[in-house]
Image: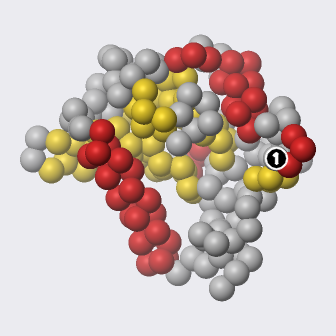
Amino acid sequence: MHIREYKLATGDTARLDHRAAIISLEDERRVLSSSLLNGGLRSDLNFVFNYDELEEKTKRCEMLAPTHEEHLKIVAENILKLPLRQTTGLTTAAQMRNAAFCEAAYGAMTVSALVTAGVSGNALRAGDRATLDQKDGRPFILGGTINVILAIDADLPDGAMLQAFMTCTEAKTAALERLGCRSVISD
């Protein structure tokens, strides 16, 4: 896969290769992340990543550490060569060649979205059994992610950032419903 680059409305750059999408934040930016690696509401980050951890040879996602947080640290620092303290990120089994990028504007505000999804063999829904179990430090992963990285070129108050996060989640649900995607383990 060739490298794709996108300039986001925020001025930031998204760079995608065959294994990762890395967003480089050009200026200080408030970031709301659900990641175990530097997640939460932060303003000290410079990089956001989405890493495809599906190994082509084994067709499996292998944890590189006993916990998912430690795994994310290894991916960020050792594989992607990103500074650990200034980075947050997600992992997926969805292939980066299928990543979608789009932007939409409303008035003077623009929202950029970078999305990866895999639902053909691992679609899950709220209420299904857990997909990551770290009991006794031993991870067991079933998979199933739709990762969305949103960049909004507006200085949103904290509550509005959380509302945008919730609306994004609702939009994912609506899209899956419209496509007729059902959980692979429940009705």
Q: Residues within 10 Å of mark 1 (few under 14, many from 20)?
A: few
Residue 52 percent coordinates (x, y): 67, 41
Residue 8 percent coordinates (x, y): 32, 33
Mark 1 lies on residue: 134
> Does 33 appear above or below 12?
below
| Horizontal side of residue 98 vs 170, given as left or right | right
Residue 116 percent coordinates (x, y): 54, 51
Residue 148 percent coordinates (x, y): 47, 48
Q: Secondary structure at mark 1?
A: loop
> Does 14 appear above or below 97?
above
What residue sits 70% from the left and 25% below the top? 73
Quadrant holding the N terminus: top right
What residue sits 66% from the left and 47% below the top? 92
Quadrant holding the C terminus: bottom right
| Horizontal side of residue 187 vs 138, given as left or right | left
Q: Quadrant of residue 42?
A: top left
Disc 1 marks a residue whose amino acid type is Gln
Q: 58 and 65: which one is in front? A: 65
What residue sits 28% from the left and 30% below the top? 10
Residue lying farthest bottom?
187
Q: 95 and 28: which one is in front? A: 28
What residue sits 22% from the left and 32% below the top? 155
